[in-house]
Structure formats: structure tokens, C-alpha cells
Image (cartoon, rainbow, N blue to C red):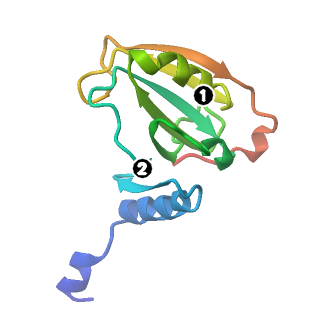
Amino acid sequence: MGVFERFFQPSPEELEILKEVEELRKLHPDFQELHGPWLFNEGDGPHRPTLKIRFAFRDPALLDDCQFYAKIGINKDTNIAEPYIGFAYGSGSTKDELETWAQKFPYAELIVGLDYGGVITPKSEVVILKQEQPKNTSERKPQG
């Protein structure tokens, strides 16, 4: 293999991300906009999100008719049994709607006190809204 081929050869980490993205793209037609390891739905998000819902799921139909700016990815949190994770963004005016929407997922938490880019800070607060126990942990997808 020459220098040129090695230069364009993806690393094992890049191959893993490409495999995950391909899996995610098959999940739901509304989530196709790729940014890093995340797939976003169409539309503009809040200009300055002040809160977000972190949700976990196995059934992609739960994403149908998502009216919030959201992203989905492969769940890497071993404390949550579902194979996929997502974040839906909002502000104080959409808090109640987001909380209601989040109830359909087996796991959901509300995160408030985000920085300007919608990222958690040391001052952020996390409240678990829903946490169902997995029905069969042997079906749990391995992490990593």
C-alpha cells in the first residue's frame, strides 16, 4: 500500500463512526443531516436553547412527527439500556411541550441551564422525567 492509499485509509475509529452513521440513517427518514456522530432532523433549532431533553429509545417510530429540533446517535451510556439516544432542544416557552413529548420514551431527562451553544455547564441541572426498567437486559446492545 502506497502513501496515497494510507493517507485516505480510514482509521478504526473513523470506520466505527461510519458504521454507526449508516445504522442511524436507516432508523428514521426525518433524521438525515449529519454533524459528527449525530443525525439531526430538518429545521432550525432555537437560536439560544436554554434547555434540552435527553431521551433514549429502541423504537424509531417514537421519533415520528418530532416538532422539536433534535439529534440522535448511538447510546454510549451504559447506565441506560436503550440502544439509541437523542437530544431535543428548546427554551422556557417550550418546556412543558418538551416534557410532555418526552414521556413517550422509556428514558427521558430534562437538562436546564445550558451555555450559549446548548451545552451542559457545571451549573446545569438534570431532572429524570422517566426511567423504565428494561424488560430483558440480555437484549441490551453492548457499548463502544
What numbered label is drawn on residue 24? none
**Helix, strand or loop for disc 2:** loop
Q: Which of 100/39 is in front?
A: 100
- Tell me if 124 is positioned left or right of 78 in this view: left
Q: Residue at x 56, y 20 (%)?
A: 99
Q: Which of 127/104 is in front?
A: 104
Give yes or no for contact between labels 1 and 2 (Cβ–Cβ under 8 Å).
Answer: no
Disc 1 designates what residue? 101
Label 2, residues with CA under 10 Å away: few <14, some 14-19, many ≥20: some
In terms of image quadrants, where is residue 4? bottom left
Q: Residue at x 36, y 62 (%)?
A: 14
Measuring from the top left, give residue 67's x and y in whole percent: 51, 37
**Helix, strand or loop for disc 1:** helix
User: Mark 1 and mark 2: span between their CA atoms?
Assistant: 18 Å
Label 1, residues with CA under 10 Å away: few <14, some 14-19, many ≥20: some
Q: Which of 2/51 is in front?
A: 51
Measuring from the top left, give residue 43's x and y in whole percent: 38, 45
Residue type indicated by callout 2: Glu
Measuring from the top left, give residue 120's x and y in whole percent: 34, 23
- Tell me if 45 is positioned left or right of 133 in this view: left
Instruction: Classify 92 as above or below 22.
Output: above
Disc 2 designates what residue? 42
- Tell me if 11 is positioned left or right of 76 in this view: left
- Tell me if 123 is positioned left or right of 29 in this view: left
Residue type indicated by callout 1: Trp
